[in-house]
Amino acid sequence: MRGMILVARRELAAYFNSYWGWVVIAVILLIDGLLFNAVAMGDKPKYSSEVIEQFFWVSFGCTVIASLPVTMRLFAEEKQTGTMVLLDSAPLSRWQLVGGKYASAMLVMAVLVLSTLYMPALVFVNGKVSYGHIFAGYLGLMLVAAAATGVGTLGSAIARNQIVAFIISALLLAFLVLAWLLAKVTDPPLQDVISYLSFYDRHFRGFGEGKVSSESVVFFLSVAFVSLLGSSRFLAARRWQ
Amino acid sequence: MIEATGLTRYYGDFPALQDASFTIADREIVGLLGLNGAGKSTAMKILAGLLLPSAGTVKVGGVDAVLDPDALRRKIGFLPEEPPLYREMRVREFLQWCGELKGRTRKQVADAMPTVLQTCDLTHVAERVIGELSHGYKKRVGIAQAIIHRPEVVILDEPISGLDPQQIVEMRKVVRSLKEFATVLISSHILSEIEQTCDRILVIHKGKLVAEGSDEELSARGERDRNVALMVRGGEAELRAVLDQASFVERYELAVRDGEGHRELAAKVVLTGDHRKALVNALVQTDLELRELTAASATSDLERVFLKLTSGEEAKA
């Protein structure tokens, strides 16, 4: 546990002692804010719940996209700069290493997601919103962040440099987000499997509407777990390379 | 302290290390000598727990590198050729983090810090950002991170590469000082470095361990004691007779110089082994006046042996 905290602590310092962490958060918040204004608020009058629903739809996309720059450096940068040897030669289990890196990225993602709270808060000014709806939506966003960060961590563990890590993670996440499109052109039983993997259509939409589904909670946590398991296996396999 | 048996490592079909067996005693400084691509770094990475061997076993302080890599890593301090440093961190902060990462408590690392900074001559740059340091200081920070947790074995891969002559001399002192508390394995392709720093040398070539021993032992495999130059006063025929009859003389060349009132004979003699004493005994039993007997070698003995070993002329002794 101590090793995991040490890894996470250094990683967080690297995010926030450089411009990188701040720039990513600022850019994503800017895009999220602009989209909230243009898409969720819009020109026409809407019910508050409809505005919130569209806000979560916009924030879902921003969260998935934000996970890419946040995670691409986790392991790939260490491999690029040669500092991976410090972690490889330390008495840390691969789980501790992956856990520490993941925890730091997840903390950045949590800061990012929670920084958007001012937007639903604005809806309270002229509308009525259920706290339960807000809670469900943010729970969904945190679960999406957990799963997308896990996938990003896996991409970074596989790749030798940050660009490749970004591309691998982007492809995996694009598949998981757009799986519902693919499901439309496939036949059962493959269609059911692909459809089940769809981040938004199958699992997040309910959270955005204020409904918490235990099946989707398990799904997002499973994606995160499997990704981290894969990351630790890839890192352990480096000793065989 | 280190016991490697039949160590073999393949990268795909390429054998980077083949059936290497060696032992290294406690508090010994051992040099791994070989040309670029000989397999030195592969051997060091296996010993540091970074790579698994394709075959063979490694034990460090009784701990099996394959079966218990975490326990092995606690015993090892490793500096790769390029020091692994977080450029944005300050020296003290970085070393504190490394020490704790290697399993020491915050207090243990803080207590060891002054000694380590002093050993590596980093005290005056302890609060500086690593990215701003010169290459030589970065190397020292690299060594400091390898010893901050007081490991039993310190592995240094090419620690002097890229250093200027003054930095090399200082680095040599640092490496020698590590012997006080650790076994040191150091790799280099620079012979003089290995010669001056190490107690014992392992010569590796094309993945195979081709020789091991001290500088003197390896040099003895050379020709220092076989090639001698003689300066004798007396008769040419008498000298020829001595050299022709001596079974330990392989061949010789003779030159005659006429001096003032005497004749000097200069001979370059190749012996079958270190038979200098027998040669002197044979000469003093004649009327010849032996003026001088010196080793004829002009080049480094170890260098000659190394070149011989790495050109495949000589197998492991």
Image (tube, rainbow, N blue to C red):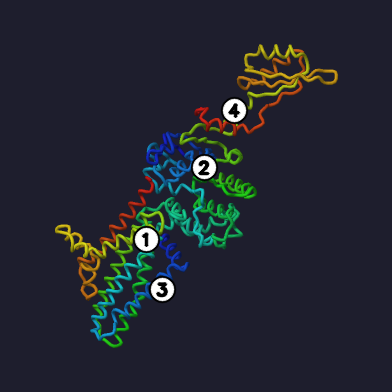
The CA span between labels 2 and 4 is 24 Å
- The residue lying furthest to the bottom in this view is A126
Tell me which amino acid carries mark 2.
Answer: Leu
Tell me which amino acid carries mark 1.
Answer: Phe
The reply, left or right, for residue A32 in relation to residue B174 is: left
Q: Residue A36, percent across and down?
A: 32, 78
Question: Which quarter of the figure has residue B189?
Answer: top right
Say which label, 2 or 4, has the lower sequence index.
2
Q: Please name whichever residue, B272 or A69, is drawn nearer the observer in this view of the structure.
A: A69
Tell me which amino acid carries mark 3.
Answer: Ala
Question: Which quarter of the figure has residue A144?
Answer: bottom left
- The numbered dot on residue B222 is 4
* Discs 3 and 1 share one subunit: yes
Q: Chain of mark 2?
A: B
The reply, left or right, for residue A13 in relation to residue A207 is: right
The CA span between labels 2 and 1 is 39 Å
- The numbered dot on residue A26 is 3
The CA span between labels 3 and 2 is 49 Å
Q: Which residue is mark 1?
A: A166
Labels 1, 4: front one: 1
Q: Residue B218, percent across and down?
A: 57, 31
Q: Residue B61, percent across and down?
A: 45, 42
Q: Secondary structure at mark 2?
A: strand
Question: Which quarter of the figure has residue A34?
Answer: bottom left
Tag 2–tag 4 contact (CB < 8 Å): no
Tell me which amino acid carries mark 4.
Answer: Gly
* Discs 2 and 1 share one subunit: no
Tag 1–tag 4 contact (CB < 8 Å): no
The CA span between labels 3 and 1 is 19 Å
Q: Which residue is mark 2?
A: B185
Q: Count residues near mark 1 (Cα–Cα under 10 Å), then give few for <14, some for 14-19, many for 20+.
A: many
Q: Please name whichever residue, B121 or B296, is drawn nearer the observer in this view of the structure.
A: B296
